Structure formats: structure tokens, C-alpha cells
Amino acid sequence: MSNYKIILSGGGTGGHIYPAIAIADELKSRFPEAEFLFVGAKDRMEMEKVPQAGYEIEGLWISGIQRKLTLKNLAFPFKLILSLLRSRNIIKTFQPDVAIGTGGFASGPLLKIATSKGIPSLIQEQNSYPGITNKLLAKKANKICVAYQGLERFFPKEKIVLTGNPIRKELLHKEDRTIEAKDTFTLRHGKHTLLVLGGSLGSKRINELIEKELEFFQTQNVQIIWQCGKLYYNEYKRYNDLEDVQVFPYLNNMDMAYAASDIIISRAGASSVSELCVVGKPVIFIPSPNVAEDHQTKNAKAIVDKQAAVLIKESDLDIDFENKFSQLVVSSEKREELSKNIKKLALANATNDIANEVEKLLKK
């Protein structure tokens, strides 16, 4: 039987949505007759991104618990009860053969109902330190696919499978395209190329840093591909007038941007970290301090502890940045060491491996 019904839930941020879409795409290629349904949070980006990827989505009225006391928290119990009732209704109507959760608010109610109905379920944890939703769901889930070692501190050991996080397909072609990529961006071959990534929306703090250090980069013989984010493009596009600076709201050809770069500055969201392991370039992580449970610092630390990247906290940028950056620029040995070590951490077959686990649940 290949006309399976598969329900997926995850969202709030790209880090939860894109893995869910990647898993669905892989399962669809294996089971072309299968039916897919996504469940997301009503006002979040999944309501736009999932239909763009060609899948149906239902929305729940749900949001996360705020870490400080706010009025929003007062509404949380009502939202949760309504979302559980709505999830029960969705599952009763759709009757899935398997439920997949990739984290984020909406996956909580949906997978809670699915597991209570005895539907085989799999959760995928992208971070080195799990979120509240997945910790609560782990007791009842059949399989837990993780991207980092050492998660038996949080999850039942016998359910864990180390798969990694799904990676964009275009990044998996491994031949060296540096020359072609530098030509694509009309970059100079005798200069170091810095790629700056602040996440899909951009990062205010990283943008401020790059603006402040533009003269310093000139002294370091560095040219820049700067993805400043859609929110900040109008503010920073004027720097396109400078020689050796290219500012973009968003990079559509990420594979080429990675190939052209010699050093990368990035946030440390789980998907970004997994991609950067596959890319294998020297990275300076500047984690966002404004995410739940300080996930990003923990993700970056898991890489830095293996001597595979550099970590600078936002609060230390003014003191440490120039020093740590110029150490990388002057030492090709240091760059090669980071490159070699981060590649060892790459789990490039994640999407395939997760789909294998789903397939086992379907065939039980």
C-alpha cells in the first residue's frame, strides 16, 4: 500500500518548517500516491511557505509560552485547549497512518492527540538542546531523530536515531566551484571573501557590526557578500556603492555564495549549523541571544567544543571581533583546521535517514 496518509507539523520559524518540507518531499518521491497534510500555527510563516511548496496546511490558534509574565500567557491555556480540540478534529477527519513533528508550537497539540490515538509518530529535534515541545512529546513518540550526540540526557535512549538535520539538496553537490562562484559574484580572486548571514529575516546586531567594521575589512584585504535581510535592506543598500561590498536582502543562490566564500559569519540556528558543517568553510558563529532556552549558543558550542568553529557572543563583539577575525585571515593553517574539523561533523544524508525511519513506522 503506498496511498499512505502522512501528517506533519512544525513551524514558527524556518528552522522548523524547512525540515518538515524536506521530509515530505523525500516521502513523496518514495510514495507518489501518498496524501500529505501539514498543521501549523495560524499567523506564522508556515501558512505561506507550505502552500508555496505544494502542500495543504491547516492552522491552529497557538503560540509559545512567553518567558516573562505577559498578558499573552493568560491566553495560553485557552489557545492550548482549542488547539487540542482542533487537532483531534483534524486527525479524526484525515486519519493519518503516521504523524511527524519537527518542533515549534503547533506540533505539540497535534502530536499529543496523534500519540493518544495510537498513531505511530516520529519527532525530529534540530537543536543540541531540545525545546519544551519535543521534551514533552518524547515519552509517547515512537522514534526521535536528532542532529547532535548526547541527547539521551533528555530523551529515552532506545528511541533516539542520530540522523542530522535535512539540508538543501543543492548544497550536496560536492565538487569545488570556487572559481565559478567568485566569477558569478564578480569577486576578485586575490582577496579573501567574507560571507555574512543573519538568518532569513536578517540580524540587527550582525548588520551593525559589519557596518562598523567596513574600514577594518579593507585593511584585511577582504571583500564581502552581505545578506542583511529583507527588513534591513533599505538601510544598508547604500553600501553597494563601495568597492568590494555587495549587499543583498536575501540570497537565492546560497550554494554559489557558500562556494565563493573563504570565511563565513553566521547565526547559529540549527539548520544553519547543519548546512555549514556540510559546506565545510571556516565559520565565526554569533548566536542570537533572543531565542528560547538560548538554543543558538548551545548549538554553536557543540561545534566549537570540537575545534571546528569560532564563537563570539554578541556582548563580546566590541572587544573580541577584530582580534579573532584577523587571526583567521592571517593563518591559512587555522582556516584549514576549522574547515577539516567542521566537515567531520556533517551528516549529509539526514533527509534520507529520517524518511527511512518514517517508512519503518508505516510498514509496521
Image (cartoon, rainbow, N blue to C red):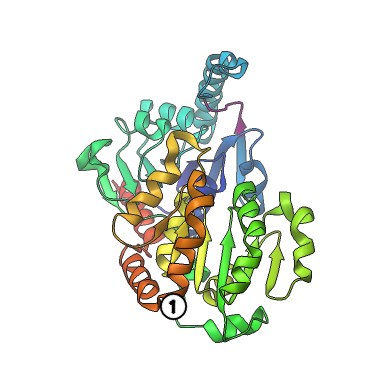
* Dot 1 crowding, Cα within 10 Å, few <14, some 14–19, many 20+: few
Vertical placement of residue 37 versus 194, above or below = above
Tell me: 174 left or right of 265: left
Q: Position of residue 314 (x, y in %)?
A: 51, 46
Depth check: 157 or 307 in front?
Answer: 307
Quadrant in the picture for residue 152? top left
Measuring 52% from the left and 36% from the top, which residue is drawn there? 94
Part of the protein shown in magenta: 59-64
| Principal secondary structure, stretch drawn in magenta | loop
Q: Position of residue 263 (x, y in %)?
A: 50, 69
Depth check: 339 or 346 in front?
Answer: 339
Measuring 62% from the left and 33% from the top, which residue is drawn there? 59
Tell me: 67 left or right of 240: left
Report the residue marked by disc 1.
174
Depth check: 193 or 151 in front?
Answer: 193
Measuring 62% from the left and 61% from the top, which residue is drawn there? 213
The answer to whether residue 85 is visible is: yes
Answer whether residue 358 is magenta in the image: no
Give amino acid for label 1. Answer: Lys
Query: In what element is the residue under mark 1?
Result: loop
Answer whether residue 60 is magenta in the image: yes
Tell me: 329 left or right of 160: right
Q: Position of residue 364 (x, y in %)?
A: 28, 46
